[in-house]
Image (cartoon, rainbow, N blue to C red):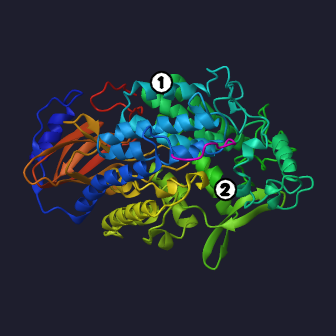
Amino acid sequence: MPTLLLLLATLAAAPAGFSAQPLEAGRPAPPPEWALLERQLIEKLHPAAMEFVKRYTQPDGTLIWRREWPGMDGSDDGYESFYNFPLYYALGGPEEMNALSRKLWDAVTRLFTRYGTVYKEFDAYYDWMHHGESYVNFYFFGLADPTDARFRERALRFAGLYLNEDPEAPNWDPVRKLIRSPINGSKGPRFVNTAEDWVTHRDVLANYPLPYDDIPNVTHSKAWTDDKLFPYILDTMNQRMMKGDVPLNLTATSLMLNAYLYTGEARYRDWVLDYVNAWRERTRRNNGILPDNVGLSGRIGENMDGKWWGGYYGWRWPHGLFNLLEASTIGASNALLLTGDFQYLDLPRSQIDLVLSQSRLENGRRLVPHRHAEKGWYDFRPLPPQYPVNLWYLSFDPADRARVERGVDLAALERFVYRKAKGDDKHEGPWLAFLAGRNPQYPEQMLRANYQETLRRLEMIRQDATDPEQMNVHHWQQRNPVVLEGLVQLMLGGPNHIYHGGLLHTRLRYFDPKAKRPGVPPDVAALVDGVSADSVSVKLVNLHPSAPRDVIVQAGMFAEHEFTTAESEGSTVTVNARELAVRLRPGALAHLKLGMKRWAHQPTYAFPWHERKAR
């Protein structure tokens, strides 16, 4: 039996902590180009991050920015500016990144508390598109170090804001299973918005369609910036939008699941499932269409004269389909993570099927409606590909693959053209083509492109002469040089998280058993080169010519999957464990095909050497 398989067989029966003596694995080989590029990116993102932080923050970590910032918007952008720092550490970035990312999170919290946007360390009130942008940063801390007592306490306290554990924040109706307003947070539901709440956002919203066509005295979107007309918009929104629940609030399931991943307590799990099931039931009652507004009584269209459209961040305003697919996919994927029940994916599936049923072909392109109002379905554009791609990745159901093929121009999707996006997450297509064997150069292409993007952002930083008093809230996000999409796809075998509040669902993650920390050890590179419904194939490389490297490979980002078998060099052994420990010989390359039973365990942030609960 090859030494690698002997190692795996030994470690499969080893107790927690991996006390068994590992055996050497892999064969010496010249390092592949992708491995050299991957290690370069892992190592060089650190000085880039430090240059960024030095340029834009005070010694205490607070942003060098304005003395005042009014309104309810903005704190999300502060957190977003460093949102992937803890993930970088969790992938194998330097130890300093763990403490730095926490320092920066604390500093953003202090700054926006001073501005009045944050209260009790959580956004005082805003919607869950923006909460979601804020708290992906926060969720990554559990992946970086779940034993940090301060961040664990915050995770439970923040989840408690939606369990009515804080008397100042009665956000949740436990009887009707609804969040009581689209605008919510540590000060509770915001039933009445003021002009001051929207002061920093009015010029942005002037570029979107009006929320309604029948607002008194208002006929065009520029009314957002007209002090005489804006009150009519605000009054109409307060009357129709602000009392009751909206699908956007499904993004709050990530906050509750974050607490569960720390604790395993059933109340957090039950809340997620209750809430997702409530929206599934509302969709069933609405003839399969996800309604975008539910009144405080639980009635669909309660404040909209019975209409199922017209809610805040709903089918009509401001983005339409994008928000419905994003929130429903986040909620469904979180419920799937907890249960392994693929039926939860029917919620976003049904909405994709709905718009595909209304689609049209124009110049060879399939366009789907992104909005609905009194005039019916309108605003025909291509289906956003990341949502059907995410569904198919989660399920590996051929019917979900068919949805991708029906709704998306695959040739265009799979073509590699590097595009800068807010969440650095626009390259699902060429990655899928690589996994299917149609783009073997993708790893090198993507890693080079990510490094080039880091260099481009550093040059922006060096040329930046903007007065801090004139910087907008997106200034730092646009310059954050830590670009991770390629590392996530190639190392972990999954797409980037859904940017506005989704958790990171992947097939693998890694730990350094010697340093007792997350991420690949020094000199180790990893490439997932195959994924199926019940297996994953990964190459592991030790770039050190004279020293071995030990690495733990975990099944799933949250240890939710289980390795069933391990195959290498033509031999297969039974594993039946959440993780594998491998010792790579000096200069060695190992290629493993790992059988996998997905959703076999309750998810957890706990590391392999921590105590873990069984399903």
Query: What residue did someone put label 1 on?
Result: 153
Give the residue type that dot 2 points to: Leu
Residue span colored magenta: 64-72
Going 14% across and 35% down the picture, which residue do you hit? 10
Observer-nearest of 562 and 546: 546
Q: Nearer the viewer, residue 410 or 584?
A: 584
- As helix, strand or loop, the secondary structure at mark 1 comes to helix
Mark 1 or 2: in front is 1
**What is the magenta segment's predominant secondary structure?**
loop
- Which residue position holds label 2? 321
Quadrant of the image occupied by residue 575: top left
Q: Residue 204 at what x, y percent from top left?
A: 70, 57
Left or right: where 441 falls relative to 153: left
**Residue drawn 40% across the image and 60% down it:** 458
Quadrant where the C terminus sits is top left
Q: Nearer the viewer, residue 12 or 91?
A: 91
